[in-house]
Image (spheres, grey):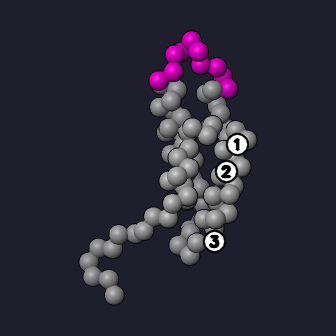
């Protein structure tokens, strides 16, 4: 599996911003972004005409596989119980 150049550059910027946040963890955030892109990629492949699918289509994550709006957003944790 590889990531095309365009989304790789966008991801680099998103990860740089995410690293500066106080609630940023380790590689879990990056792994979640990639795994979600893989799920989107698989759905895209399933909807394609099987005769039109090329080897590069199978093994390359492209911009449309990533949800860049979600990647860049800061999610807030929902507190359970009383917060002080």
According to the image, label 3 marks what residue?
20
Q: Position of residue 77 (x, y in %)?
A: 40, 69
Q: Position of residue 84 (x, y in %)?
A: 34, 87
According to the image, label 1 marks what residue?
6
CA distance for labels 3 and 1: 23 Å
- Label 3's element? loop
- Label 1's element? helix
- The foreground one among 80 and 74 is 74
How packed mark 2 is, by other alpha carbons closer than 10 Å (few <14, some 14-19, many 20 or more), is few
Tag 1 and tag 2, C-beta contact below 8 Å = yes
* Residue 55 within the segment the image draws in magenta: yes
According to the image, label 2 marks what residue?
10
Q: Position of residue 48 (x, y in %)?
A: 51, 21
Magenta stretch: give its range. 47-56
Which residue is at a point 56% across and 50% down the rendered structure image? Answer: 68
| Horizontal arrangement in the rendering, residue 6 relative to residue 40 (left or right) | right
| Horizontal arrangement in the rendering, residue 23 relative to residue 20 (left or right) | left
| Residue at the extreme left | 81
Instruction: Report if residue 32 is visible in the image.
Output: no
């Amino acid at each position: 599996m590889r990531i095309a150049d365009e989304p790789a550059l966008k991801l680099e910027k998103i990860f740089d911003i995410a690293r500066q946040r106080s609630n940023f963890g380790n590689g879990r955030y990056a792994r979640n972004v990639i795994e979600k892109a893989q799920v989107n990629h698989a759905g895209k492949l399933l909807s394609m005409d099987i005769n039109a699918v090329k080897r590069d289509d199978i093994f390359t994550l492209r911009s449309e596989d990533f949800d860049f709006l979600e990647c860049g957003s800061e999610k807030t944790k929902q507190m359970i119980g009383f917060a002080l």
